[in-house]
Amino acid sequence: MLNPETVPPEDRPILLYEKRKSVFPKAIDGYYRRIKWAWMVLALVVYYVTPWIRWDRGPYSPNQAVLIDLAHRRFYMFSIEIWPHEFYFVAGLLIMAGIGLFVITSAVGRAWCGYSCPQTVWTDIFQHVDRLIDGDRNAQLKLQAAPWGPKKIAKRLSKWAIYLVISSLTGGAFIAYFTDCPTLAREYISGEAAPIAYYTVAVLTATTFILGGFMREQVCIYMCPWPRIQTAMLDEKSLIVTYKDWRGEPRGSVKEAKSSATPLGDCVDCNQCVAVCPTGVDIRNGPDIGCITCALCIDACDKVMEQVGRPRGLIDYATLGGCEAEKAGQPPESLKKAILHPRTIVYFLIWSAVGLGLLFALGVRTHIDISVAKDRNPPYMLMSDGSVRNAYTVKLRNMEGRPREMEIGLVGLDGARMWSDDQSAATAGRTLTRSVAADQADPVRVYVIAPPGTKSQDFTFSLRALDKEGGSDSHETHFDSPVEETE
Ligand code: SF4
Ligand code: SF4
């Protein structure tokens, strides 16, 4: 059997499975690392604090600012309350989030992956825990190679214990978006929360622990579809983290440069860019699907360039087109020009149009709503006097935090009258008045009776709020009769 270590790389067989090489990124400070810190802190504060924010909606609605109330089928976001029949708002927000990713990718490449993706944020946190317990890269490499002993076991256990605490806090914060957060926290700690709360936290703890603690860059490289989609979206105008090979090559140390017969490039082959990379990529080999555009290699290389007295920016944010121009001796492309290219502007306009559409729909939506389901079986009842009766389930929605008087009316269907389950047929009329409780949907059984000879036809139930704020809605439905509608 061949020993792969003794076979030259070019002669080695291509294997379908490659064992993971663990990544131990070195700590780095610099411009992009500080942006990453600030963004990470902001994202974590928003994630952990949001469920604790209170928002007064009156006595009939929950007072949590952001709440996905599955039990009552409502989504609350500050002063906005979305009902199930308004799911298009949620769909619109998801579409905006999707197009938003397109805008970001088109403008600044995989910035989502490098700065905001939960996988990146939690992996970053866990890598800092590694440094806290094991030390920086070299100490981690040494510990990894060391045989198992009391010191290594103690370090591993303490690290995993911290991972577990972080992971369970992550799961705990997630379920707080689905129920009243202070109540949940109290019940959870005292063991009185619903079993589903414990199951959900257990599942989320396990996934965070495994994905952030152990799988790390493998999630980005092998599991996440986004890098593939993004790769298809990138072109020569997209901003990516790039190694300027025409400037860096041929690479060689400062010492080698002094003794070399031919001039060497700016890269001193210090490997610092690889050492700090959280996904273990060597950006000098060209664009790589594993590169999440976190720009930490820019910080590392800029530091090295400063130390050896060469211009910064050997690794930099740049477009491939800009690099070609720079290689040909033209000045570097401005960041503004690289970001504001036509595709980004088109994506941004689409994103804005969806956003404005949602805002408009929010602004004009009524806070009362009517929906009607007609009885199909039987479609009608023929009464002894020849009149025809149809039955409907009419749902009235009051989306305000106070009870409201509403009037249902018949539009069309001449001569027809209606009454509800809790009235006698003798009181039937063209309108019905109901009081609908605050923030409730009120289903009413309504019977509509039409004079003999009435043909099958469409008609409308109208709804009108009787208080001074007003508001109206309507729902078209059908009236069935033995006399068929003529064209
Ligand atoms: S190559 Fe550079 S930008 Fe890409 S992931 Fe590694 S450190 Fe981040
Ligand atoms: S950090 Fe810069 S100088 Fe060092 S190996 Fe990477 S590209 Fe070359």
Image: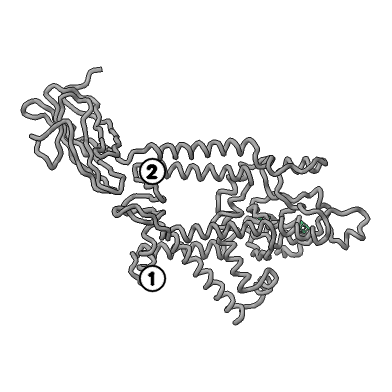
Q: The N terminus appears in which quarter of the rendering?
A: bottom right
Instruction: Tell me the element at label 1.
Output: helix
Instruction: Check mark 2 vs ligand 1: CB closer than 8 Å? yes or no.
Output: no
Image spot of residue 208 (x, y percent): 51, 62
Residue drawn at (76%, 43%), measured in percent from left and top?
332
Q: Of the numbered discs in the image, which one, if any, rests on residue 131? A: none
- The three-letter code of the residue at mark 2 reads Phe
Whether residue 132 is situated above or below residue 123 in the rendered picture: below
Residue drawn at (63%, 62%), measured in percent from left and top?
20
Q: What residue does disc 2 label?
A: 87
How many numbered marks have been drawn onto this rendered protein structure? 2
Whether residue 383 is situated above or below residue 160 in the rendered picture: above
Relative placement, left or right, of 332 versus 294 is right
Label 1: how many residues lie within 10 Å, few (<14), some (14-19) or many (20+)?
A: few
Going from N to C along the chain, the mark reached first, 2 or 1, is 2
Q: Nearer the viewer, residue 349 or 271?
A: 349
Image spot of residue 414 (x, y percent): 18, 23
Label 2: how many residues lie within 10 Å, few (<14), some (14-19) or many (20+)?
A: few
Relative placement, left or right, of 463 versus 217 is left
Instruction: Tell me the element at label 2.
Output: helix
The image quadrant in which ligand 1 is located: bottom right
Image spot of residue 21 (x, y percent): 65, 63
Whether residue 96 is situated above or below residue 68 in the rendered picture: above
Outermost residue, right side: 261
- The image's colouring method is one colour
